[in-house]
Each structure stands twice: as structure tokens, then as C-alpha cells.
Image (tube, rainbow, N blue to C red):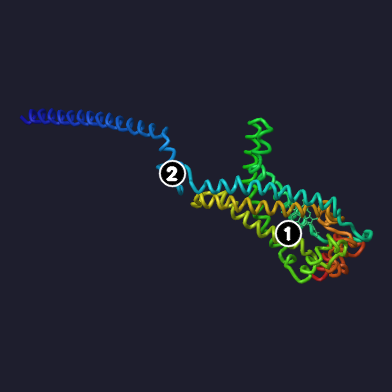
Amino acid sequence: MTKRIQQWFAMLVTAFMLTVSVSAFASENAANTDNERLGESVVKSEMAGFAGADYWREVKDGQSGYTTSKSPEHGVLISVPGQTWYILKEKWMSPLGALAIFGSLAMVALAYVVVGPLKLSKPKTGRKIKRWSRFDRALHWSMAFTFLTLAFSGLTLVYGKHFIKPVVPTEVWGWIIYAAKQYHNYIGPIFGILLLAVLVKWWRKSLFNMVDIKWFMKMGGMVGKHKGTHPSAGFSNGGEKAIFWLLIFFGIFITISGFILDFPIFGQTRRHMELSNLLHMFSALILICGFIFHIYIGLFGMEAALDGMITGEVDETWAKEHHDLWYNEVKDLPENQPGYDAAQEAEKKGSTSQNNA
Ligand code: HEM
């Protein structure tokens, strides 16, 4: 009897389970079919809208849609204020920047032809005055190399499509723009580090004083009725101090905006990126123009100026004529006496301290 009941019970359970699973299967199929139908209709309506002018009008007007992304403004395919950024960058800053760069190049060319290089008024004496340490020179040339290569890669990113793209095969253009972008992204932060080092090392000697005001009033003794007058100056003259603070001021803007553009992982919106892009470009253009004049003076505009940044020493005549106050301060230092041997001096100092110990 018990066995029969067990058999009936087993049959009932099996029947129940069969019924449940069959109905579940059936309802799933039905749901699947419903879902498929729903999906099809959604796709159809999307397709219809996708191709339609209304759909694109909404997208172009900045209508927010749906994506699985979590980044700010993730649902907006086309950002309306972004058009303002595009116009400011492409229609204003880009052509005006090119004009400013070519204008600066034309001005230094004109200065070379009309005013000519600033020559020493007396012959060199041959006595050397120590001006830049090995560390100073390494810092200067690292900064110069980093800045100039970043300037060239940055200008390629902005103007390459007008000047390079039309004259090279598409594949070569692809490589050029890819290399420029990668170089700019990875080397950019090094500029920020060098800028900090330059600020720490040279800020003190770059503070303005009354001597610099007089230097500016005489236009550095470079042009007009003041040409060749050699106004007084300390280690740096007013012009050098101005270029130093220009570098620091706009360099900070470039570094901060570059950081915002380089690392878009701190919740920056498109507005932050657009503003950073404009600020980055504007500051870089100012510095590029400013340093066209600096490079002109260093390379062609002033006789014997480059010696100091290459060897670390300048001729006595140059020091007296361009930085008289500094020359008077340092001319009697042992390191500036003829026949001074730094290695010998260091050895002497070492043996004296050993004897004392
Ligand atoms: C071919 C490129 C360059 C040349 C030939 C050059 C040349 C020189 C020379 C000769 C000096 C020393 C002037 C003196 O002894 O009084 C100098 C100083 C300096 N240079 Fe350059 N330079 C170049 C590029 C750059 C660049 C790209 C930067 C920065 C972006 C730069 C930043 C500086 C600074 C901050 C000083 C110190 C100015 C001061 O406070 O006295 N230079 N440069």
C-alpha cells in the first residue's frame, strides 16, 4: 500500500514538474517572441528615426540620449557649446596665432637687417668671467630642447592639416600626426618639472629693481638714440627678467591646462577641456613668439652672448658692457682671476680640511 502511494506520489510530482517545466518553456518562448517583436519594433523605429532629419536635428541641438558610459555628459553626442570652442579655436586663435608667429619671425629678420647685431664696442680682453654653472647650462638646454620640440609638435597638431597633410601621402600624414600627439602627451609633463626647476634656481636673480626700470627707459641700449649706450644692469637685465617671468607665468598656465587635457580622469567636462585647450594654445603662442626674440638675441642679435650658455664663461669686455653692476661684484672673486684652476682649488680645499681634522 505504502509502495502504491509512493508510486502515485512520484507520478504526480513528475507530472507536476513536467507541467511546470513545459509551461515555463512555453512562456519563455512566448516572452522571447514578444521580446523579439518588441526589439524589432524598437530597432525599426530607431532606424526610421536614425535616418530622419528630426533625429539628427535633436542630436545637433545637444539632445541627451542614453549610453552605458558613466563619464560626464555621456549621453550627449554633439555638444552645442562645443561649436563656440571650435569657432574660437579654428577661426580665430589658429589664424591669429599663425600671424603672430610669422609676424615675430619677420620682426627679428627686420631687426637683423635694419638694426643689425649688437657688437662689442671694445675688443675682447681674453679674460674669462664665470657666469653659468654646469647645472645652469644643463637646465637651460634641457628646457630649450623640451620647449622647442613641444612647440614643433604642438604646431604640427594645430597647423599640420593645412601645411603638411596636403603634400604627403595619407599614411605618412597618419604617422606624423600620431607621433606628434604621442610626443606632446608624454613629454609635456617634463616641461612642467623643468619649469619648476627653472623657477627655483633663477627666481631670486630675476626680481625687478630700479636699475631695470632705467634699463627699459633706455630700451636696453639696443635701438634709436640709445643704441650702443649700454645701460647699467646686474646679473640679468630688465629684458632677461621680463622673458623669465613671461616663461614662468604662461608656463604655469600651459602646465595646468596641459595636465587637465592629458589626464581626463578627474571628472572634467567638455567645457573644462575646451577652456583648457584655448588657454593652452593661447599661452603657448605667446611663449613661442616671446622666445623667437630670445633665440634671435642669443644666436644672432648680440655678439658673444652665446659663449656664456655654452662654456659657462663670458669675456670680460662683454661682462663690463652688458652687465656692469654684476661685473663689478664678481671681478675680484678668485675664480675669475687669470690662471685659476678649479680642480687644483678643490684639491687644496680638500687637503686643508683633512689637515684640520
Ligand atoms: C636655440 C635656442 C636658445 C638659445 C640660443 C638661447 C640662448 C640663451 C643665452 C645665450 C642665454 C644667456 C644670456 C645671458 O648670459 O645673459 C639664455 C638665457 C636663458 N634662456 Fe635661452 N636660449 C634658447 C632657448 C631658450 C628656450 C626655448 C627657453 C625657455 C623656454 C630659454 C630660456 C632661458 C632663460 C629662462 C634664460 C635665463 C635668463 C635670465 O634670467 O638671465 N631659452 N638663453
Q: Position of residue 286 (x, y in %)?
A: 68, 54
Q: Quadrant of the N terminus?
A: top left
| Residue matched to label 2 | 69
Q: Residue at x 38, y 32 (%)?
A: 48
Horizontal side of 270 relative to 161 (left or right) equals left
Q: Residue at x 83, y 60 (%)?
A: 223
Please tell me whether residue 46 is drawn above or below residue 324 in the rendered image: above
Rounded to the nearest angstrom, the CA distance separating label 2 from label 1 is: 45 Å
Mark 2 or mark 1, earlier in chain: 2
* Residue type highlighted by circle 1: Ile
- Quadrant of the rendered image holding ligand 1: bottom right
Q: Is mark 1 within 8 Å of ligand 1?
A: yes
Query: Crowding near pointer 1: few (<14 within 10 Å), some, many (20+)?
Result: some
Q: In this orientation, which residue lies closer to the viewer: 215 or 184?
A: 215
Q: Which numbered tag is attached to residue 27?
A: none
* Residue type highlighted by circle 2: Ser
Which residue is situated farthest in the left direction here? 1
Secondary structure beneath dot 1 equals: helix
Q: Quadrant of the C terminus?
A: bottom right
Q: In this orientation, which residue lies closer to the viewer: 4 or 196?
A: 196
| Residue matched to label 1 | 243
Q: Residue at x 72, y 52 (%)?
A: 289
Query: Crowding near pointer 2: few (<14 within 10 Å), some, many (20+)?
Result: few
Q: Position of residue 314 (x, y in %)?
A: 86, 59
Please tell me whether residue 137 is drawn above or below residue 49 in the rendered image: below
Q: In this orientation, which residue lies closer to the viewer: 36 or 225?
A: 225
Secondary structure beneath dot 2 equals: loop
Q: Position of residue 239 (x, y in %)?
A: 77, 61
The reply to whether dot 2 and dot 1 touch (C-beta < 8 Å) is no
Q: Nearer the viewer, mark 2 or mark 1?
A: 1
Q: Position of residue 94 (x, y in %)?
A: 64, 46
Q: Residue at x 72, y 62 (%)?
A: 201
